[in-house]
Amino acid sequence: MNKREKILELLEKDSLVFNNLDKLFLFLSDNLTVSVEEVKKIFYSLISNGDIFEIRKNKFVTIPSRGYVKGDFSGTSKGYGFVKVKGVADDIFIPANKTMGALDGEKVIVKVIAQTNEGSDGEVVSIYQELTNIVGLVKVVANNFFLDPDNKRITQDFPIVKTGLKLKKDMKVLAKIVRSDKGKVKCVVSEILGMNDDVKTLELSLIREHNLFEEFPDVVVEAEKSVPKKITEKQKKNRLDLTGEVIFTIDGADAKDLDDAISIKKFDKYYELGVHIADVGEYVPVGSVIDEEAYRRGTSVYFPTSVLPMLPKSLSNGICSLNEGVERLTLSCIMKVDFDGKVIDHKITESVIKSVARLTYDEVYDALMGEVNEKTKNLVDDFKIMRELCDVLESNQEKRGALNLEIPEVQFVFDEKGMAVDLTRRERNEAHRLIEDFMVLANQTVAKMFNTLKIPFVYRVHEAPTKEKVLALCDFLKGIGVRYPQIPDNITPSYFQEILTTVEDTSTQDVVNKMLLRSMQKAKYSNQNLGHFGLALVDYCHFTSPIRRYPDLTIHRIIKDYLHGKIGEEEKEDLDIFTFDASEESSECERNADMAERDVDDLWKAYLMKDRVGEVFDATISSVTNFGIFVALDNTCEGLVKMEGLPDDTYIFLEKQLKLKGSSNVFSIGDKVKVELVNVNLYSRDIDFKIV
């Protein structure tokens, strides 16, 4: 039990009441045998995370307990709201007069005031994590400026406090929320994003709505000045020198943050696969301003026209990037893999490399197809060995039932002015799978080692789907006429893979892939090794991208401390707390980044379709509802055919079969249809069609 858990355990005791906080801190300090200052730090951290709540003066309860729970507040246009509590299926209803002024997206503590068969009602008693920024449209009423929030779940307009900024009607702005002691909300404009009729403004608005920023804080910019441009002889000391080895990188053509490199050899009885990862931990000390900003960002975010990096460019594109022809510090996972694909030995070590080539996926694929260039002509044998090993690894993946989900991704084409001119499905080739399979193997090897060592770690986990979700999926499959195997008592990845094999190369493949994905739990980070269902692995982590993912950076530091003999029992206790916090924070950052990327993609899709109203397209029905059908075009655009856009008929919605059935027409998931584009709304990113 770590210090945080001990404090929570002590606070749970009913008799624990003190006249003042100093006495409470002293009591906790004596029981934990740690300093009062450390107790205060943990205590206030628990308050800021909503883990404890002061129900009356100097009387604290742990959350959840005594009818108090914490969760995410979702507002509605009617004023009432709901609170989503982690691990609880049903949301808590919050009446309009019990919200305490909470805004959509804020984290709150709720007291449950009523429970019935229909659900729970509650009241917000604390907002422990407030919104700091809000994006909206400037409105002018009687010469006063107001902010109309883009988030339509926030129904009120907020008065804008006057500053030196020159505001105009229909400007999009970013503003900071200011709450008075009485709970009244105003806002101060901190950034003018542009005019509302500009697609680039709309893109920037979406990015800001997710609280994402291109620029780093001034303290980070200042700290960046001391980032070195090249490695030193002192840094190379005691590292494995791999600068004479054939090591190369394979990435997308536009990638600039190269954090993984490969080496491959074949011997009489095994392959030697080296996965060499940028040693970011060497340049980003724990607790530094750059580290704190990386922790807050959690991940790099990739948009069609830009990248919002987790680390400043001097690190991500500079000293940490494994650029061709320059020495770089790395953490290497060097594995001996037998001809059956089993790792029979491995070594994880600090190293120094010099990449012989910066290659793209297309260059490697072309070389495998017999078309070489100056960079690839001397590496063809390496590529062939890579493919050989990859085939063995994929055979093993198939045997253990790892899922091979093919979800279409969009590829945009932009002109020199940064405006989208076309879109299509993103193509993947054999070179992509080479890198992916090798990264998976390295991630598995590292996770297995540290799980065996019982050192606190950050794992990438993907839990098995619930039985209810699997039953719902099978109901759906039955409704669309897809045969599925009998549901086993123990749901395994191989069961899902059987279903995927059944629909391979059929008209329902994309739809079944999506529905299967929805039935599964979302992958996340955890300091508990819960396994990875989708990959059918007992041990898995993210080790291979420390430039763009904070969990990878976290475990790099743990690995380096272990290699240097710095992890004792006291360090393990501190790591237990930090890996828990880092896992929670990184999972949340990842979810936010995913939503932002999806929203921006949808905006550019809508932009490209807006001038094509009246055109007819081939489409596939991707979902069916009681208010219409959703269709997907081959270029990945999706839109809605409302009931009035269907042929005249009287329709019944068959929910389990996901069909709209009329007397003369039937519309089912997977059906091929012709649709006409009738409307595009850039602001809501909605695309509407009608059946031709």
Image: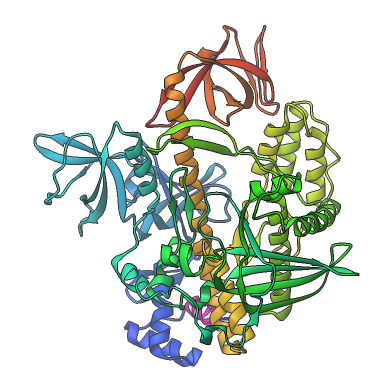
The C terminus lies in which quarter of the figure?
top right
In reply to whether residue 11 is colored magenta, the answer given is yes
Residue 660 versus residue 363 in the image, above or below: above
Q: Which residue occupies the foreground of this view, 442 or 34?
A: 442
Residue at figure coordinates x 71%, y 51% from the top left: 433
Vertical placement of residue 158 versus 35, above or below = above
Nearest the eye: 620 or 473: 620
Image quadrant where residue 339 sits? bottom right
Residue at 18% of width from left, 35% of height from top? 169
- Residue 84 visible? The answer is no
Q: Is residue 365 left or right of residue 314?
A: right
Expressed as whole percent of the image width and height from the top left, the position of residue 316 reads 47, 64
The residue range painted magenta reads 3-14
Q: Main secondary structure of the magenta part?
A: helix
Q: Is residue 510 left or right of residue 211?
A: right
Task: Please tell me in which quadrant of the rendered image residue 80 appears.
Answer: top left
Task: Judge whether residue 357 can be spotted in this image.
Answer: yes
